[in-house]
Amino acid sequence: MPVIEVEELEKSFGDVRAVDGIDFSVQEGEIFGFLGPNGAGKTTTINVLTGLARKTAGSVRVLGHFYPRDLRRAQEGIGVVPDGSNLYPELSGKENLTFCGSLYGIRKEERERRAAELLDQFGLSGVAGRRFATYSKGMKRKLTIAAALIHRPRVLFLDEPTSGIDVASARQIRRILERLNCNGTTVFLTTHYIEEAERLCHRVAFIVDGRIVRVDSLNLLLEEVGDDCSLQFAVGGDAASAREVLSEVFPSHKASATGDGQLLLRGERLDDIIPAVCALHDAGVTVQEVRLLRPSLEDVFVRVTGIEAEEMTAHRGGGS
């Protein structure tokens, strides 16, 4: 059963159409990724879905409730983690959680117990009494997610959940999201980290300049590049000369020199690395290291959108 249904959704800011007639649905119990570069319309979409912004046109239904008519009823069953913190800097970690619990009408004894449970789950019990303002970025992010879970929502919305935090905190957040999903929580997350979407999501939507260009399961998307592989070489000497050798031996493949003695050979059926290594050796090129790179969601994203991974954080489109 779909818990989120969106049809012909539009959101404009003056003359700028940030979201341009998008359609998608999210099934109960899945992790759905909204993947796109900065400025593609991800945050605008999630703001509409969570009631933080009003749609310009189209239909939105969350947990069976239409917006804006039934927005209040829908919000009782969703948790929201915005791209910035929405907690109070002067309150402690525990006080922030119990206050959020009170907003949902949770009784004092239950919200105290639930706050302690979440602080332990997120590894924040040791700083529960410290003011939120003194937390690190990673700690702030984890407490913000914990606050969104205080009322045990059926659907959790997260906007760039691991952006700008340390690696250890990001890994912990991903593990927590996976456990939540295993226990039945539907997760909708926006991200411009392709690798994160590949690790977490069952299905993803690619959005560029306010328009969805593809929605599909991760498995089906990866099947499209199933035969494509890459060989990455670290070579001694002139990488450009080594690239010419590979181009001659493998004319149907793409060879490129990436700098610092790095070579990349892309194409189908490259599981066997020996022919390429032998070709370089026969040409007098010293091969220091070689790695077989399997196709990834990044390859699919580049193929579908034409946007390279390194452009993801620099690209600007029609919305935020």
Image: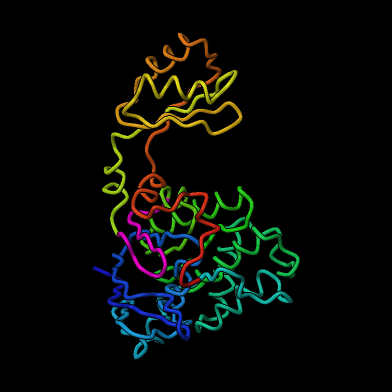
Outermost residue toward the bottom in this view: 69
Q: Nearer the viewer, residue 13 or 188?
A: 13
**Residue 288, image quadrant:** top right
Quadrant in the rendering for residue 57: bottom left
> Residue 43 in magenta?
no
Which is more toward the observer, 173 or 12? Answer: 12
Question: Does 205 lie within the magenta span?
Answer: yes
Q: How many marks?
A: 0
52, above or below 282, in the image = below
Give percent across and percent down for residue 238. Answer: 58, 21
Residue at point 30%, 60% (across, down): 215
For the point 60% across and 52% down, which residue is it?
Answer: 169
Instruction: Please identify the residue farthest to the left as the structure is shown.
Output: 1
Q: State the quadrant of the N terminus.
A: bottom left
**Residue 317: image location, x then y, percent:** 47, 67
Q: Position of 98 compared to 206: left or right?
A: right
Task: Tell me residue 3's x, y (percent).
Answer: 30, 71
Q: Is 283 rendered above or below residue 138?
A: above
- Seen at 44% across and 72% down, the residue is 46
Question: Depth check: 181 or 250 in front?
Answer: 250
Residues drawn in magenta? 200-214
Q: Position of residue 289 (x, y in %)?
A: 53, 20
Q: In this rendering, is residue 82 above or below 126? A: below
Question: Which residue is at a point 65% across and 64% down the rendered structure image?
Answer: 140
Q: As rendered, which of 124 and 311 lies closer to the eye?
A: 311
Instruction: Tell me which secondary structure the magenta stretch mostly adopts.
Output: strand
